[in-house]
Image: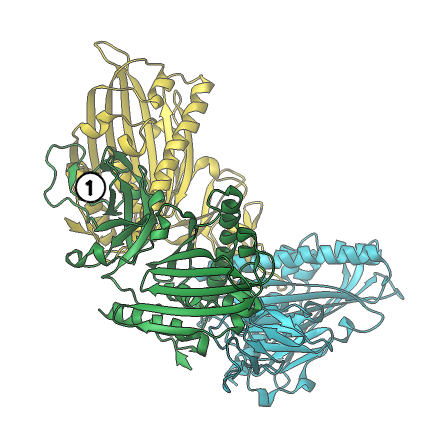
Chain colours: A cyan, B yellow, C green
Amino acid sequence: MTAMTADHTAFARNQWYVAAWSSEVGRELLGRTVLGEPLALYRTQAGEPVVLADRCVHRRYPLSASGLDGDRVVCGYHGFTYDTTGTCVYVPGQKRVPRTARVSSYPVAEVDAMVWVWIGDPELADADVIPRAPHLAEDGWVTVRGMEPIDADYGLLVDNLMDLSHETYLHGGYIGTPEVAETPITTEVDEAAGIVRVSRHMADAECPPFYARSTGIEGRIQRLQDIEYHAPCLYLLHSRISPSGADSPVFRTEITYAITPSAPGKVYDFWAVSRNFAVDDHEVTVFLRDFNHTVVMQDVDALNLLQRSLNTEPAGYQELSINIDTGGLAARRILAKLAAG
Amino acid sequence: MTAMTADHTAFARNQWYVAAWSSEVGRELLGRTVLGEPLALYRTQAGEPVVLADRCVHRRYPLSASGLDGDRVVCGYHGFTYDTTGTCVYVPGQKRVPRTARVSSYPVAEVDAMVWVWIGDPELADADVIPRAPHLAEDGWVTVRGMEPIDADYGLLVDNLMDLSHETYLHGGYIGTPEVAETPITTEVDEAAGIVRVSRHMADAECPPFYARSTGIEGRIQRLQDIEYHAPCLYLLHSRISPSGADSPVFRTEITYAITPSAPGKVYDFWAVSRNFAVDDHEVTVFLRDFNHTVVMQDVDALNLLQRSLNTEPAGYQELSINIDTGGLAARRILAKLAAG
Amino acid sequence: MTAMTADHTAFARNQWYVAAWSSEVGRELLGRTVLGEPLALYRTQAGEPVVLADRCVHRRYPLSASGLDGDRVVCGYHGFTYDTTGTCVYVPGQKRVPRTARVSSYPVAEVDAMVWVWIGDPELADADVIPRAPHLAEDGWVTVRGMEPIDADYGLLVDNLMDLSHETYLHGGYIGTPEVAETPITTEVDEAAGIVRVSRHMADAECPPFYARSTGIEGRIQRLQDIEYHAPCLYLLHSRISPSGADSPVFRTEITYAITPSAPGKVYDFWAVSRNFAVDDHEVTVFLRDFNHTVVMQDVDALNLLQRSLNTEPAGYQELSINIDTGGLAARRILAKLAAG
C-alpha cells in the first residue's frame, strides 16, 4: 500500500499546457485559470492568440470580463487599456500613463488546433517541445471535441485515463466490455522524455456501441488500445478496431485528452475524438459527439464524487495498487519529478 | 449561565446507532455516514443487512455508488469486488487478489424495523443492549416514518426533543397548544442506564389538529407526554390522549426518533408515528404521514437556522437554562460521559 | 503602487450606520447584520423603531425568526419574551424569570426615512451627529429606493462610488458617457469632519438615457457631479443637469447611498434616487426605479466578481492608483482612522 500524503498533486510550472481549443479563442475575451494563474485569452484582428494576466493593474478587476477595442483590451470597470504585450496604453482622466502599468503576458503557441500557454519562466518557453496531436488539425480527419471542468485534483484525471480497465465498470454499455478489465496491459516508461505508454491488445472482444455505431461493424472485433501520455498535459489513445478474422480493414480512432490543472482541486478536461473513416457521414459525427460527451460526463461525475469523498478522508489515507496501475504510478512519478523541477 | 465550549457535541463511538430504516435497505447500495464513517449498506439475497466501509481499497471510490453481483459489491470504478465480510475476492486484470485487500465490515443488527450499526470496537458490540421500540414492528400497530438529514450538531436535535415546550411556539397550530409551554415537567434521570425520562401531564388542554384529526375527538383533552430517552440514539415519546371527563377511552400514540450523528454538524433525524387505533383507516395514515412530516420540517428548518446562527457566534457563547431544560441538560451530561468512556 | 495588506477594510464601531430604510421596519421582525452583529428590528405599536440583539438568551435562536406580541418579541422556538429594552419578561414553564435574562438593545435613530443604529459604546451614541439627507423625506421630492446585499468588502463599494469614471465603462448606455471618464476631477478632503468631496463638472456632454428619459432633454447637456461622502456610511451625489446653452433650467437629482458593512466581506448597498421635478409623473418614477435598479445590479455583479477574484489573490497584492482615485484613497485613510478609534 502507498499513502497519498499531499493534499493535491504538485504543479509543474515550466511546462506547456492547453488553455483552450483554438475554436474557443476569438474576438471575445475568454477567462481560464491555469496552475492557479488567472488568464484572459483573445485573438488579435490578424488572428494571433494573446494570453494576458486576468487582473487589471488598477483595482484587479478581471480583464476577461472586459471588452476589446481592436487588438487592445479595455478594462470593463474603469477603462484601463492594454496592448497585446500587456502594456497599459490608456488610463481615464489623465494623459500620463504610469510607466509601471502593465500586466503579464504569457508565452503562447497554437499547435494542432489547441492554444498552449507557458506559465513558468518565460525564458524557458520553447514551443518546439510541445507534443503533437496532428490528427486534430490535419486534412482527412474529422474531430468532435469539448471541455469539461472537474472539481478534482488533476492527478485523479491522470489516474483515470492511464487505467482503462475502468471502462468496463464506469462506461459499461458505452465503451466498456468485459474484455477491457480482463486483458492484461503492457507498460513502457520513458522517464527522461516524460512519456508513459500503456497497451492493451484484445484479440477477440465484444464491440461496444461506440465502435459498432461509428464503424458499422457487427459481431466481435480485434481491439487495440495504445496509450501514449506525454506528461503533464497531452494524452493520446490510439485505438484500432477490426472485425475478428484475417485481412479485415482496420478502423483508426484517435482519442485525445489535454489535462490542464486549473487550481488545487480543479482540472480542465479537454477531450476529442478524431476519425479518418466515414468523414462525410454527419450522423456518425453527431453520434460520436453526443455519445463521447456522455462518456466524459460519466468520468466527470465519478471524479467529482471521488474528490468529495477524498476531502472527508483523514490525511495520509491508504491506496492499494495492482498491475493495472503500473502506468498511472509511473505517471505520478514523472509528474512529481517535473514539479520538483 | 453555562458556556458551550466545544464546537460540537462529542461522539460516543461504542454505541449502537440507527443507520437506516429496514425498509431503506435492499438490493441497491445505500450510502450513509455515521459518526463520520462513510458506510455502504445493502441486503443479501437471503435478506441479511450488510454494512461495509464505503471506500474501495484501490482508489477510495465510494462503494455506495457501485452495484451488486449476488451478495457481492462490485466497485463502480474498476470492479474490485467484495464479499459480505468486506474481503476483496476479485480485482481486474490479474488472477491474484492482494491479501491485504479488504474493507471494514461493521456489526449490524436489525431490531424493530431499524438497521442498527456499531462503529466502535467490534469486540464490544452486543446487540442485546439495543433499546427497543416494539411498536414499530408489532402487529396491531400502524407506523408512518421518514428520515431528514439536518445540518446541525446532533446535540441540538437532542435538546429539541427533550424540551417539548417548543411545541407551543414552533409547532403552534400543529401539535402545540398553550398548555404545553405552561405545564411544568417532571424529570427522572438514570445515569447508570443512560436513560432520561421527562413527563408533562396536562389534565385539561386544547386538542391540537394532530390528535383531533387522527382520533376524531372534539373538545378538550387530557394529554400525557412521557419521554423516554435512551442515550445516545433512541427517543420514545409515549403519548396518551383522552377526552376530558371520567372513563374516557385512551388513545395511545408512540412517537419515535432515532438521533444519529452523521458527521460534526450533521445529524440524521429518523422519525416515526405509530398508533394502535384506526389502524385500517388509510385517511388517518396519510394525514399523520403528511402532517408529521410538516412538523418535522419545522424542526429541521429551525435547527438548520440555529446552527447557521451559532456558526457566526464567537467561541464560548453563553446559554441560559431554566427548568424546562432539566431533561436536556441531563442528556448532555450522559452523552459527555458516553463519549468520554 | 500601494499594497492592500488587510483581508478586509476594518470596521469603525463607534459610528452610526443605516440598518434599514424606514419603510422596511414594521410589525414583522427584520433580521440584519451590522459590523458582524446580528440584529432584530421592529417597530412598536406607537411607531418607534427598536433594535435588539438577534439571539435569544436561552439557546441563541434568532429573534428575527420570531413573532411580536404587542411591543414584545416572543422567541419562535420556546417563547422567551422580551420587551423593547431587551429585558426578558416571560419564560415557559415557570413563574420566575432569571434576573440575568436580557438581550442587548441598540441605540437607534430614525432620520430622513432611514433607521440608523449604533453598534459601539452606547455612551457615545449621539444622534445629532448623524449626517443628513433631507431630500429623502422632504415634501417636494420623490424618491425611488432599494437595498442590495453584496458579497464584497465594504471598502470596494466605497471605492466604486468615490470614482465615477467607472460609469463610462460599467454603466455605458445607462448613466455613463465618454465625458465622465475623460473629465478630470477636483477633490476636497476634510479629515477632521470625515468628509470627502469629489467634483466633476462636464460643460458639454452627451445626455445618457437616465437623464434624457427623466427630464425630457434632447441633445447635449451641462452635467455637474458633486460627491459628498460622510464616512463611513452616507454618500450623497448631488447631480445637476441642464441643456447646453445659456439660461437653461437646471434639473436636480440627489443620488443617495448608505454603505453599511454587514460582516467581513459583506456589505449592504442602500440606494436611492430623489428628484424634485416631474414629481407627479408616475412613468418617470417607474422608469427611474427600474433603470437605477439595473445600474445598481451592474455594480453588484461587478463587485461580487471582483471580490471573488481578490479572494484568489495572494496576500499583499498590488494596486496602481491614479488621479481618479484621489477621493477613494482619502476615504480609505479616513475609514482607517475611524476604525483605529
From the viewer's perspective, is B157 left or right of B195? right
Query: Whole-percent x and y of residue B309?
Result: 31, 50
| Kind of residue sitting beneath label 1 | Thr
Q: Residue at x 35, y 23 (%)?
A: B210
| Quarter occupied by residue B253 | top left
Query: Whole-percent x and y of residue B61?
Result: 52, 58
From the viewer's perspective, is C197 left or right of B169? right
- Look at the numbered disc 1 and give the secondary structure of its residue: loop
From the viewer's perspective, is A13 left or right of C279? right
Number of numbered markers: 1
Residue C253, placed above or below residue C45: below
| Quarter occupied by residue A246 | bottom right
Query: Whole-percent x and y of residue B224?
Result: 23, 23
Q: Where is mark 1, residue-wise?
A: C84
Residue C23, placed above or below residue A119: above
Query: Dot 1 surroundings within 10 Å: few (below 14), some, or many (20 or more)?
Result: some
Seen from this angle, which residue lies furthest right?
Answer: A247
Which one is nearer the viewer's eye here, A183 or C41? C41
Which one is nearer the viewer's eye here, A137 or A200? A137
Query: Whole-percent x and y of residue C184?
Result: 48, 75
Instruction: Residue A126: tell me if it is visible.
Output: yes
Instruction: Residue A207: tell me if it is visible.
Output: no
> Chain ID for label 1?
C
Seen from this angle, which residue lies furthest front?
Answer: C247
